[in-house]
Image (cartoon, rainbow, N blue to C red):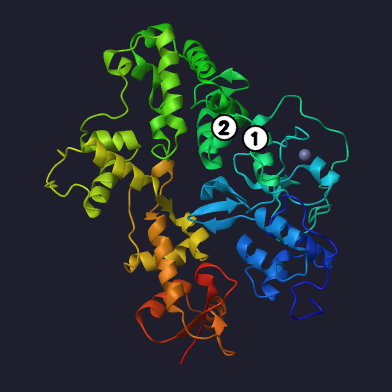
Amino acid sequence: MPVNRDLPFSQWRLRPQQGEPSYGYFARLVADEGHSSLKIYATEIGINGRNPVPEEMLHVLQQLPLTAEEHERLRRATPLAVDSFHQIGSERLRPKQLSYRRRRFCPHCLADAPYHRIQWDVVAASHCPIHGKRLISEVGGKPLKWWWPHFDVSPDGDELIDRTAAAPDRPLPFHEMLRSRLEFGQREEGWTAAHNLYDLIEASLFYARFTCDGKPAKAKSNSAPDIEAGFAVVSAAHGERVDWFSAWYETVIPADVRRRGFEVSTGWSFMPREATYRASNPLWDALEAAQYEGFARVGTLSRKFSNHDPARTDRTLREAAEELGLPPKGLGPFIKSLNLLPNSKWNGDAHSIDSATFDKIRALVDDLITLPQTKVITGISGTEFRRLAKAGYVREFQHMPVGGVAGPRYFAKEVCQLIERIRLSASEPIEEDMVSIQTHCRKNGFLIGQVVLEVLSTKRYLTALHPLRTGIRALLLRQP
Ligand SMILES: [Zn+2]
């Protein structure tokens, strides 16, 4: 443990590198202290060691006397929770687009310099743009996790570094874009630079499913979607995109099916409107327009689609549900509980949803997050957070499997507001005998969610806020 009790480490001769997030640098310092478990080290200095929280680790590292430039470098490469996004420098990723549960890496990059690059944690990333090699997440058949702080060997002694020469055998613009934006804080050349990273990733992932081994493929039978191919469709000029869609239809859909029209030829798996954030992602309209044009060259467009107008007129509940990719039994109660159709009788299925209301519903659906995603905001497990929802402190929605993922849904905004309310209520000055909510629960065998409920509804605890911790984990408490 550190010699200097005021600082989290006894030495910091290793310095933060370009694109290195807090947990990567933290790991290197743990190893440099001669320790072989980040988990134990973090726990002993009083932060979450089991599931590292990047922001919390950043706060700890900010205590080290590094240069202002080094601190800034570290901050810009660390994912921070902002408006239910991961903010990295000036880029944003949606919660499910980033994962640091497992360590992923390029063994050739580790040979160049043994530290973690933030772009390896983008879930959609598959390759290293410098060396062209697939990123590695398993060593000796096991996932490599962040409790292990070393970059040269695995816990079982397997080499993590590959010193042989390697170079890409094809350009990797998607991965170069990720590296440029996340490692260097610079956007790429061209018009895609005007778009949000999370929008580009969402659309690229969608179209990645339609290419397999460099050939047009049906999404469902595609065992190896290619994110670079998806990004190629997304980043292409309109004319090139139309060509691509036209070739896709011609290759994958038989001519007699194409003659029967767009909808039959396209099928539900190829409807971009299924995409989760369609309403807020400006790329979808342009992609869809190119898709119609591409189809028109090789198939028969009915009148309905040749006059394609995104602003359709009224929909029934069933139509709205189908368009959003949600079951009516979930969407109905959702609309009803938010009072979005105040004049509807709710005694049958015959609701008329006008375009403006539909857009409103779609925007609200886009704002929903899953139970595991609440953790980014709350800092506590989904199971514990759910106690607050069950007690009515935040609204919970069932049967709304947005993006095909089951489980309850919450409004990101309401979760943020509840956490803010809890944090604001913790207004006592910090005193010696206060303990963190985690310590209190561990010592007494209490459940965190249960104690938070008591904090909200009783005067059993005096509470203060730890200045460096995020979410509910910042609560310090004692019994009066
Ligand atoms: Zn590499």
Looking at the image, the residue that sits furthest to the bottom is 480
Task: Name the image quarter holding the N terminus.
Answer: bottom right
Give the spatial CA distance, label 2 vs label 1. Answer: 8 Å
Query: Which amino acid does the dot numbered 2 rest on?
Result: Thr
Q: Is residue 256 left or right of residue 145?
A: left
Q: Residue at x 72, y 48 (%)?
A: 117
SS at mark 1?
loop
Q: Residue at x 33, y 42 (%)?
A: 362
The residue under label 1 is 188
**Contact between labelled residues 1 and 2, with CB atoms less than 8 Å apart:** yes
Q: Is residue 376 left or right of residue 322?
A: right
Spot occupied by residue 19 in the image (x, y as percentages of width and height): 72, 49
SS at mark 2?
helix
The residue under label 2 is 192
Q: Residue at x 77, y 57 (%)?
A: 16
Which image quadrant is residue 27 in? bottom right
Spot occupied by residue 8 in the image (x, y as percentages of width and height): 74, 73
* Towards the viewer: 319 or 179: 179
Quarter of the render that holds ligand 1: top right
